[in-house]
Each structure stands twice: as C-alpha cells, then as structure tokens.
Image (cartoon, rainbow, N blue to C red):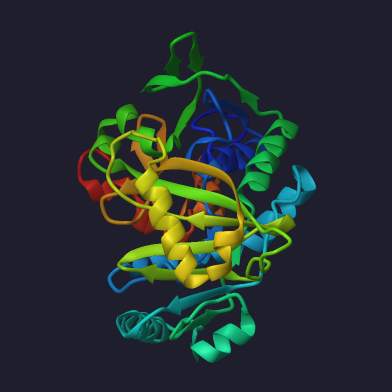
Amino acid sequence: MSNQHVAVVGGGVIGLSVAWRAAAAGHRVTVVDPAPGRGASWVAGGMLAPVTEAWPGEEESLALGEESLRRWPAFAQALAADGGDPGLSRAGTVVVALDRADADQLDIVAGYLRSVGREVEQVTGRRLRALEPGLGAVRGGLLVPGDLAVDNRKLLRALEAAALRHGAEFTGDEATAVEPGRVRTAHREVPCDVVVIAAGAHSARLHPVLARGVRPLKGEILRLRARRTSLPPPTRTVRAVVEGRPVYLVPREGGELVLGATQYEAGFDDTVSARGVRELLEGAERIFPSIDEYELVETAAGLRAASTDTLPFIGDLGDGVLAATGHHRNGLLMAPVTADAVVAWLAGEKTPEEALAADPARLGTGGV
C-alpha cells in the first residue's frame, strides 16, 4: 500500500506531521491549506504534558498522551535531521498552588496520578521558590520531571521543511469539500487515493461524522520578553489555576515567555479581547510577580479543535477518508502518535494500541 496519493487537509502541527511521515514513507502527499504552519498551532504554548493535563475520568486521553510523549524524543531527533531543530526541552513542569483550595485540588491530582503509576512529587512553597526564585507567594505544588516542552514555531517550520524535503506539495488553497477520492477547493480539485482530515476546528464542516464531534474552543496567549531590570523567566514550565482559570508560563530562548491561555466558547472568533489579556496578566503576576516588568511582544488567539470527550478522532471514516483531528489542548503532544497511526493505516499495519480509543466509530454515526 505504498506510493498512494494522500491529500492532507490542514497544515497545522497534526497535518504537517502526517504529511512529513507519510511522504517519508514513500507516499505522494499534497497538503491543502491556505496558510500552513499557522492557526492554533502557531499560538500554542508548546507544553508536552499529559501528566499535568490529567484528571480522573480521562484515562484514555492520558494513555494516548503518554504514548505520544514516549515517542517525542525520537520524533524530535528525526525531525532535526530532516527539517530542523524543534527546540525540545526536558526541563519538566512545576504546578503551583496559590491557596488552600488550590492545594486541595493538587492533592486530588497527585493522588490520582500516583494511583495510575505516574511520577509526581509534592513540594512546599519554600522548595518551589528555591527551584524557581521568581515565583511569588505560592503555598506548594507538584514537580513533574517527565513533562517535555517544544518551541511550537520552530516545530512548525521544521515540519514544513521536512515534508518538502520528502517531496510533499502544498496547494495554498482552502478545502471547501472532501469527497471520496478528491478534495475540492475554490480554485481546483485535488484527486487522491486517501484524504486525511486534519483541519483542526474547521474539520467539522468537512465530514458529517466530525460535525457532531468537533467544535472550536477559543484560546488567547501572550508573548513577553524579560528586560534588564526584571528577573529572567523560570527555567521550567510553570502551571497554576488562578481563581478557577488555568494559567501557564512556558520559557523560550532569548528571555521570552509564553503566557496562556484563556479558554472559552466563542465560535470561530479569533480576535484577542482586552478581557483575555487582563486575565492572563493578572493571573501571571500572582504566580511570577516580575512579569509586570516584561516587554509585551505579542497577543494572539487560536481555535482549539475540541472534541466531545477530550479524546481526538484518529481513524477511518470510510470511503478512503481518515480523521486526525479533535486534539483539544494536546495537538502538539499527540502529533507523533497521530502521525504514526495514520502512516500505519496507510501501510495496512496495526495502529498503536492507545490510539484505538480515538476511533471515530465511538460517535456511532458512520465511523468504522
């Protein structure tokens, strides 16, 4: 089943990962996207953190995320050789509690993670401030050494370069319809053997099964840069919940810091709101007070592809159409396992066991 013509609809991290891996496996690949490497993937924080995203009742998502995390080092090494360094960081994550209620929530998370055999260490606020001197008056927290992070923009550029190196073509068009054996755009028709729908939040309009399973979920992020008068960014990813809202700070090279992320239902509105900027800055100042001295470099918003049950949709939709979408907060994390699952399907091989739970058949409306 090699040398098939695969049309990948969507050029975010999932679509580009599929395109690179499929092209490297010998398939002819066409990526259908008007702006590959942009969209939600461009404004992501870059956390590869299934453990600190975990919550009781989401065991299948955790298993899939952890399997993908295991694949990330080899994925990044191969990508560095084919397209460029994606900026993988192994510094880990700290999750901080600001008050007693936050600490109680972290107790629940820590207990759950231990119950499923995950590595996590509960530490005092004093220990956290010794590790990350810029932290404010935090009560305590969790150390999660196994979490990784990646520079999302380096990653996207490297994936596109790697796909091009293996012969993938890019149309520069937006898909208007997916049909068996072809993808339609406003300007052309792309004939193919297999279509992979990896269009993120826009996947819902391309297939009736996905229309019932995928929706946009807006998220805003800020990018900041340390100045000479401020403390440098933390060395690890720092996560917290401030007044019920999740906040994360992810360090980047050159003194930059990614601050995110809001999360709310807003349809396909991808503008940045003043409220979102205020909430992020106020939350971050409580965690890392020196951030109020940082230069504000960028504000941006993206549309996550939320699914009905936190699991993505990876698998056969019938008639030569595959789904690779609905990854919610975990598109970057799950890119390796998703791409490997698609390439295995193309080769007629067994997909990763953890990806079986992500089969679109669970929607009961036409997946197989």
Instruction: Tell me the residue at 27%/56% (across/down).
Output: 309
Residue 222 in view in this figure: yes
Instruction: Tell me the residue at 23%/39% (across/down).
Output: 212
Q: How many marks?
A: 0
62 relative to 172 in the view: left or right: left
Q: Position of residue 229 (x, y in %)?
A: 70, 64
Residue 313 in view in this figure: no
Instruction: Tell me the residue at 45%/37% (across/down).
Output: 198
Seen from the viewer's position, the closer of residues 258 and 21 is 258
Q: Position of residue 236 (x, y in %)?
A: 61, 71
Q: In this picture, is 192 found above or below 268?
A: above
Instruction: Tell me the residue at 47%/55% (across/down).
Output: 260
63 relative to 12 in the view: left or right: left
In the picture, the quarter occupied by the C terminus is top left
Q: Quadrant of residue 251?
A: bottom right
Seen from the viewer's position, the closer of residues 79 and 129 is 129
Q: Position of residue 326 (x, y in %)?
A: 37, 46
Residue furthest to the top: 187
In the picture, the quarter occupied by the N terminus is top right
Residue furthest to the right: 81
Q: In this picture, is 33 found above or below 212?
A: above
82 relative to 304 in the view: left or right: right
Q: Quadrant of residue 180?
A: top left
208 relative to 173 in the view: left or right: left
Q: Position of residue 288 (x, y in %)?
A: 53, 70
